[in-house]
Image (cartoon, rainbow, N blue to C red):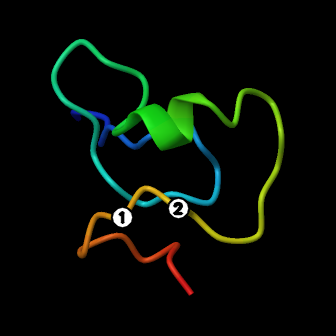
């Protein structure tokens, strides 16, 4: 069964581009910081509050 890919930022629900771990520079900039909401600015992201 194929594993669904998700952005490495825990608060983000986006799927990153093929070969990438993060969906945006904003998410990549979070590093190992845990945030309560996501600032990736993608409309489909469920982590934006």
**Element carrying mark 1:** loop
Residue to which mark 1 is pinned: 41
Q: Residue 26 appears at what percent x and percent y?
A: 50, 42
Residue 45 x, y percent position in the rendering = 35, 70
Q: Which residue is painted at 53% across and 41% down in the image? A: 27
Q: Residue at x 23, y 35 (%)?
A: 1
- Mark seen at residue 39: 2
Instruction: Report how far apart the C-alphas of labels 1 and 2 lie in the structure.
Output: 5 Å
The quarter of the displayed image where residue 22 is located: top left
> Which residue: 39% across, 43% down?
6
Q: Is residue 16 left or right of residue 32?
A: left
Residue 19: quadrant of the picture: top left
Q: Tell me, for residue 12, which label it has, or none.
A: none
Seen as rendered, the residue at the extreme bottom is 49
Residue 20 pos. (x, y %)? 31, 18
Crowd rating for badge 1 (residues with CA inside 10 Å; few <14, some 14–19, many 20+) = few
């Amino acid at each position: 069964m194929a594993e669904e890919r998700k952005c490495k930022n825990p608060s983000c629900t986006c799927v990153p581009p093929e070969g990438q771990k993060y969906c945006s520079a904003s998410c990549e900039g979070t590093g190992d910081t845990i945030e309560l909401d996501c600032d990736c600015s993608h409309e489909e992201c469920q982590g934006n509050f």
